[in-house]
Image (spheres, grey):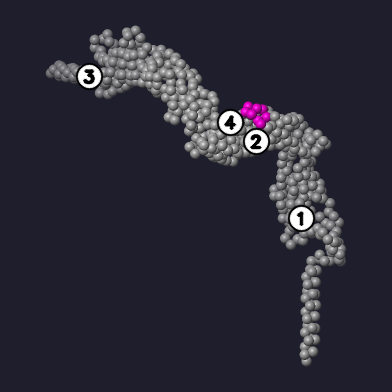
């Protein structure tokens, strides 16, 4: 009985294992029968294949067959970066993708490359292994590109309105395919471009010279003008080749330019302060400005005096409006450009206008030669731009030694009755060498100001923080200070006893409310005077500190009786009393006579 049960158990277990083995059937397939790709040479293309597990058990997949062969049977490409599908395996009923790439080197033969990619769940030599295949097709296509000489722009030089200009350029096929049905055109339809070759083929690596004519219409811009772009159209691709430029005469011209120089007011060798002047007349394009014996330097003023002409005739009747002249000195301000621009003006057909543009050279400037760019531009009623341009050179020179008072200012400049004001004084080295023993002096005896700072080092570099020295003084004014202007002198010395420049800042003190301000009387008034006793004068202390306290001064003053407060009021009252008394007596006398 026991043996019978064991037999039965074993039989059932075997049947169960058999059933399990029958149900665990491996099977899979590629999702797609074909993978079609296309690319140009010198490129890497990427794609993927997908495996569908159609069996009842998880699978590991191995790939083989990575070579793709050209239709000529010789040239080949290789599938790369394709990894087997393992860990994790593809679960039963699931799908999983595997990525790959194909590198197409430069110079690769064009055409179609085909290969068979095989996927298997084991070794292909094992009869039990299941496998499937897909076809990989890669079509290597040509690149289309050209180069031209010149490459970016072609300048036709001088030209005039309503004229035809000629030019040539070379074009080379730099792609990997022939360019067919090649035609040239122009980006602006106002211009007519004709070439000596049209609707032709340019083979790989081939260069051909192209001649052309272009007609410039009457209605177009003048000056240094970009006319437009030469264009290529073909069966394979279209592209813009290069800009076409020309210096089109007519419209606006700078008929004459005179440049006038006025130097900064400075101390001469004889100790006097003066400003020098010079000029450069009839300046042509490209010239380095020359002002005779004078040089432009820090703080100089330049006046550019232009005569601008509209060359259109009265018959053409083209007025040019909203014209501006811009003068730019490049890199003048510590590497940055500085520019000045005229106000807008108009010039009628056949007319001319004189225009001045003033340019101030900064105090902080490096001794050097600079580029000056002059740009003239306006617009006619057809919205065509008319322009002209000049390029000049300007030399900035400095004195060997020069220290200036660059600032002497008060805030506030007026004080009513009492208060305080701050004086800011700056000396600056604008010479061509470093000053080691400069001095600043600030003086006003009435205010008790006597500030001196010696042995100041001022660097030559105008943009160095140690190129200048600044001092601030606070000046306090008490009530009763005489109402008037107090000139405060700021003096710059290049060394102890060599005064180089002086500037004055005026502090105005106004009278307090109700305070009588003495006025200078032109005519002498004879009359009684009153002697006013005064206290001894208080002596003010000279200070080099930040704050200057100014005390009310004491004086002895003789005041004429006729200027005493109330004198004229008393005179008026007495006159009224006398007139009233006289009137009363007259009236009384008349009444007595009537009685």
Q: Position of residue 28 (x, y in %)?
A: 25, 18
Q: CA distance from mark 3 to mark 1?
A: 117 Å
* Residue 285 is one of the magenta-drawn residues: yes
The residue indicated by pointer 4 is 389
Magenta segment's dominant SS is loop
User: Where is mark 3, residue-wise?
Assistant: 24
**Front residue of 571 and 391:** 391
Q: Residue at position x 78%, y 72% from top? A: 572
Q: Residues within 10 Å of mark 2 (few under 14, many from 20)?
A: some
Q: Which residue is mark 1?
A: 483
Horizontal side of 557 relative to 418 (left or right) equals: right
Q: CA distance from mark 2 to mark 4?
A: 14 Å
- Disc marking residue 304: 2
Task: Indicate the quadrant where residue 255 lies.
Answer: top right
Q: Are marks 4 and 3 in contact (CB under 8 Å)?
A: no
Read off the magenta span. 282-289
Q: Quadrant of the N terminus?
A: top left
Q: Mark 3 or mark 1, which has the lower sequence index?
A: 3
* Residue 260 in the image, given as x and y percentages of width and height: 69, 35
Q: Earlier in the sequence, mark 1 or mark 4?
A: 4
């Amino acid at each position: 009985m026991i043996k019978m049960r064991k037999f039965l158990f074993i039989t059932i277990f075997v049947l169960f294992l058999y059933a399990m083995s029958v149900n665990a059937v491996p099977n899979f397939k590629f999702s797609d029968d074909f993978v079609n790709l296309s690319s140009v040479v010198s490129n890497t293309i990427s794609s993927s294949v997908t495996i569908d597990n159609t069996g009842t058990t998880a699978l590991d997949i191995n790939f083989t067959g990575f070579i793709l062969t050209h239709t000529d049977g010789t040239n080949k490409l290789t599938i790369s970066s394709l990894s087997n599908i393992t860990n994790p395996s593809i679960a039963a009923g699931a799908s999983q993708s595997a990525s790959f790439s194909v590198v197409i080197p430069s110079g690769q033969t064009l055409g179609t490359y085909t290969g068979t990619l095989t996927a298997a769940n084991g070794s292909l030599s094992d009869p039990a292994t299941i496998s499937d295949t897909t076809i990989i097709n890669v079509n290597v296509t040509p690149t289309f590109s050209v180069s031209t000489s010149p490459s970016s722009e072609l300048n036709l030089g001088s030209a005039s309105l309503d004229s035809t200009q000629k030019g040539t350029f070379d074009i080379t096929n730099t792609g990997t395919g022939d360019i067919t049905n090649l035609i040239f055109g122009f980006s602006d339809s106002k211009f007519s471009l004709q070439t000596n070759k049209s609707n032709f083929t340019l083979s790989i690596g081939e260069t051909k010279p192209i001649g052309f004519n272009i007609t410039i219409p009457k209605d177009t811009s003048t000056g240094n003008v970009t006319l437009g772009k030469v264009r290529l159209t073909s069966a394979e691709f279209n592209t813009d080749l290069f800009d076409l430029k020309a210096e089109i005469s007519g419209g606006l011209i700078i008929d004459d330019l005179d440049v006038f120089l006025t130097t900064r007011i400075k101390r001469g060798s004889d100790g006097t302060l003066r400003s020098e002047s010079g000029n450069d007349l009839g300046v042509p394009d490209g010239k380095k400005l020359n002002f005779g014996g004078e040089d432009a330097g820090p703080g100089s003023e330049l006046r550019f005096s232009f005569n601008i002409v509209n060359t259109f005739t009265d018959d053409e009747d083209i007025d040019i409006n909203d014209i501006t002249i811009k003068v730019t000195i490049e890199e003048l301000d510590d590497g940055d450009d500085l520019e000045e621009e005229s106000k807008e003006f108009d010039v009628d057909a056949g007319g001319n206008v004189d225009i001045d543009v003033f340019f101030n050279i900064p105090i902080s400037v490096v001794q050097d030669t600079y580029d000056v760019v002059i740009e003239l531009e306006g617009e006619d009623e057809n919205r065509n731009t008319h322009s002209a341009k000049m390029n000049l050179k300007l030399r900035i020179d400095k004195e060997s030694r020069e220290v200036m008072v660059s600032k002497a200012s008060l805030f506030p400049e007026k004080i009513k009755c009492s208060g305080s004001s701050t004086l800011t004084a700056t000396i600056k080295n604008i010479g061509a060498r470093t000053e080691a023993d400069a001095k600043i002096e600030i003086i006003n005896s009435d205010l008790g100001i006597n500030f001196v700072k010696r042995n100041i080092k001022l660097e030559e570099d105008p943009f160095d923080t140690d190129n200048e020295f600044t001092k601030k003084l606070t000046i306090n004014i008490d009530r009763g200070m005489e109402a008037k202007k107090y000139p405060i002198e700021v003096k710059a010395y290049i060394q102890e006893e060599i005064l180089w420049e002086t500037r004055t800042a005026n502090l105005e003190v106004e009278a307090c409310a109700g305070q009588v301000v003495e006025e200078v009387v032109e005519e002498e008034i004879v009359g009684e005077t009153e002697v006013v006793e005064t206290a001894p004068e208080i002596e003010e202390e000279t200070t080099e500190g930040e704050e200057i306290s100014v005390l009310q001064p004491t004086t002895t003053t003789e005041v004429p009786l006729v200027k005493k407060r109330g004198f004229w009021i008393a005179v008026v009252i007495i006159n009224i009393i006398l007139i009233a008394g006289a009137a009363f007596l007259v009236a009384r006398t008349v009444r007595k006579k009537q009685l």
